[in-house]
Image (cartoon, rainbow, N blue to C red):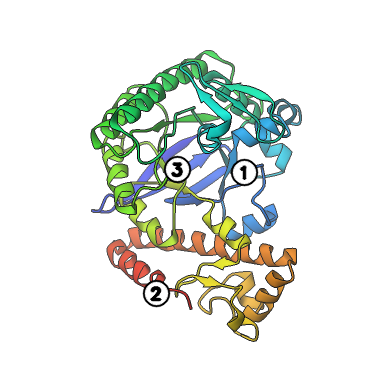
Amino acid sequence: MSFHFEVLKTDPSGARLGRLTTPHGVIETPAFMPVGTAGTVKGLTHEALEELGAGLLLANTYHLYLRPGHELIARLGGLHQFMAWRGGLLTDSGGYQVFSLAKLRKVTEEGVRFRSHLDGSEHMLTPEKAIEIQRALGSDIGMVLDECIEYPATRERAREAVERTLDWARRSRAAIDGGAPSASNPEQVFFAIAQGSTFAELRRENAQRLVELDFPGYAVGGMAVGEPHELTCEMTGEATNCLPADRPRYLMGVGKPEQLADYVRCGIDMMDCVLPTRNARNGYLFTRQGPLHITNARFADDARPVDEACGCVACRRYSRAYMRHLFQAHEMLGAILNTHHNLYFYLDIMRSIREAIASEDLPRFSSELQAQLGAGQH
């Protein structure tokens, strides 16, 4: 299969029901991508992810480049073969990782010079190098290198990052067009990333100028880095309004469960976030009645499941008391069950959002979801 995207239905709010076809499967959108940083979603087997219905995973170019190395992965048949994953894969460019490791990097027009957080070795990540690494990995969707900046940022700083992001996108486009395709995945495509911080005119301008480069998909980057949720939605909407309707739109690094429908109503088709897996490992579980901290002492003899309305394996079989015991005893099964539950919760919300768009009932669903999840800890 080659890459293809189609919009099946558009809600008056701007929400889109779609279908994304990749060389490794068809994904119904809007979709949430579990984060598999180093080629693994921490705590879950691929069989479990398949059972959960995770059709598209996100892996991290920066981390895979440093360990085990993109050339080794290429020799072993590409990332799909290396990690034995049959579904879709998206790799990010590494831009956010060098942003988040700010003490170890220096950004120039050429690219980003950084020191590995593993061993202190020095590396240079350029737009061309990011394409080279991701072609070796052979993901279905790769991302071009962009500059993600901090919040808050001055207009001058945001303008500088926008111009650099556009220049890097042009260089990436040239590298994509002028180089050999991925040996393990010749149908691989690359998305551009729109920046602009919290300045509406910069968001619009950057999106419009990237569209001129004719990428098969576009991401909105540099959001969810500390700004209020309402501002995230506003800036996302400014960008998506300037993006072509027939291309997928990916909002990077979001979000909380009660916010997912908001992003979909901004015209977003794809999202990813570490919250469900990271919070799971810390004993923080999402439920339809609000968050539940399994560490709380009152769950020590609670025979109920984590969420009585949930159909996941953990909730069908295990009690809160047992889940708390596992966490308190530092048993690895605790993190496994917590992760399974949280990802089921996220993917189930996305299924419900798709159903609500199809039945033209998204506003009601969204308001009810926010009311339920804002109920507080129980």
Q: Is residue 160 left or right of residue 28?
A: left
Give the numbered dot on residue 37. 1
Q: Nearer the viewer, residue 132 or 180?
A: 132
Q: Mark 1: which secondary structure? A: loop
User: Percent position (x, y) of residue 141?
Assistant: 53, 35
The three-letter code of the residue at mark 3 reads Met
User: Rounded to the nearest whole Å, what is the CA distance between mark 1 and mark 3?
Assistant: 14 Å
* Point 51% across, 59% down: residue: 347
User: Percent position (x, y) of residue 60?
Assistant: 59, 38
Q: Could you classify mark 2 by the number of other residues whose Cα lies within 10 Å: few (under 14), some (14-19), or many (20 or more)?
A: few
Tell me the residue that label 3 is attached to: 252
Q: Is residue 9 left or right of residue 190?
A: left
The three-letter code of the residue at mark 2 reads Ala
Q: Mark 3: which secondary structure? A: loop
The quarter of the displayed image where residue 184 is located? top right
User: Percent position (x, y) of residue 278?
Assistant: 58, 56
Q: In front of the other: label 3 or label 2?
A: 2
User: Percent position (x, y) of residue 147?
Assistant: 44, 29
Earlier in the chain: of badge 3 and badge 2, it is 3
The three-letter code of the residue at mark 1 reads Thr
* Point 23% across, 53% down: residue: 12
User: Rounded to the nearest whole Å, what is the CA distance between mark 2 and mark 1?
Assistant: 32 Å
* Point 66% across, 77% down: residue: 317
